[in-house]
Amino acid sequence: MRSIAALQAAISSAAAGDAIVAADGTYLNNTINISTSGIIVRAATPGGVFLQGNNAITISANRIVFSGFQFTSGSIAGVVITVTGNENLLTHLNVNGYSAQKYISIQAPSQRNQIAYSNFENKLPNAPIGNLVHIEADATVPGYHRIHRCSFQNLSGGGGDFGNEPIRLSNGAEAAYASRTVVEYCYWNNIRVKEASNIFKKAGGGVILRNPNGGTTWAGNSYDGTMGMAITADMERADPLLDTNGRPRPGDRTQKDIGCVEYTTGTIANRPLTLAGVGPSYLAGPSAGPVVPSIATQPH
């Protein structure tokens, strides 16, 4: 398809199992509504389609694969991609320097949606207040969503609630709801923490946090080491009592296994993530795994 109008027409007339392919190029001011379940909507070449300007993409169907698109210039007052359906996969996306309230919003009570092999970075400091990826929670329906093999980078600004959260799993009003979202194998660079009930620890007495914004509040967190910020009543210094019977951690970062102590006596498999292990394939991310999985491989 060589225009968004043609792409939308094909989506609207598609049947389950169809693949709708957008020709490589730049498309401006795009509104796309995906309401037919079981289809693939992808770029002809991963990363070859740029959706710029004012974009609003809604996925209300189930088992959709949305893959290979870039958003690198433009703005919207609201959300770039809104998901209300179930078991959808958003993969090999790049949202870099785009101005929006949120990049992706997965709304309740949807379930089992995935965001994978994507890069999110450089949300502009003057963008509308929000966050990069927002997972809503429902009072009675757990989400079971999954965010994996993604990179979140270079989120600057004044802190507070001004768009500097890479991921928000629910919010204060939904604090008692069960989201059950899994975030794994993601790469983080220059991000901000804004959740409760965390443990912060760094070996060797090093500084755990740098460049505090001065407006942060904490609740139910513990730390062991030098925090690098003023300690409040909601921060408790406590030894996490980790088992130290493992082998000593090597000094070279590339030789370290994941964890506070080394248990493996054989080959180390769980090394710290680098950008080569996450994000879209066209941004030097991993080539392992299909760029566009078939509908049959999606979670059910």
Image: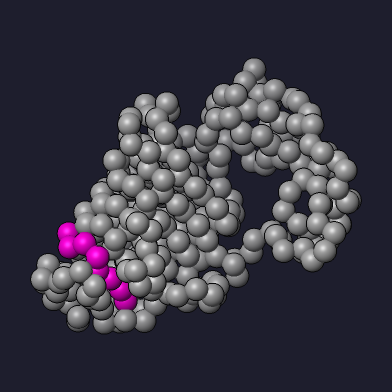
Asked which quadrant contains residue 265, the reply is bottom right
Q: How many marks?
A: 0
- Quarter of the image with the N terminus is bottom left
Asked which quadrant contains residue 168, the reply is top left
Eyeballing the image, is 5 above or below 182?
below
Asked which quadrant contains residue 42, the reply is bottom left
- Quarter of the image with the C terminus is bottom left
Residue 117 lies in the magenta stretch: no
Residue 37 lies in the magenta stretch: yes
Eyeballing the image, is 226 above or below 80?
above
The x and y percentages for residue 13 are 10, 71
Query: How is this picture coloured?
Result: one colour
Q: Residue at x 73, y 38 (%)?
A: 201
Q: Residue at x 47, y 34 (%)?
A: 160
Eyeballing the image, is 203 above or below 174?
below
Q: Residue at x 76, y 25 (%)?
A: 238
Q: Which residues are magenta?
A: 35-43
| Left or right: residue 273 compared with residue 289 | right
The x and y percentages for residue 266 are 82, 64
| Left or right: residue 234 compared with residue 120 | right
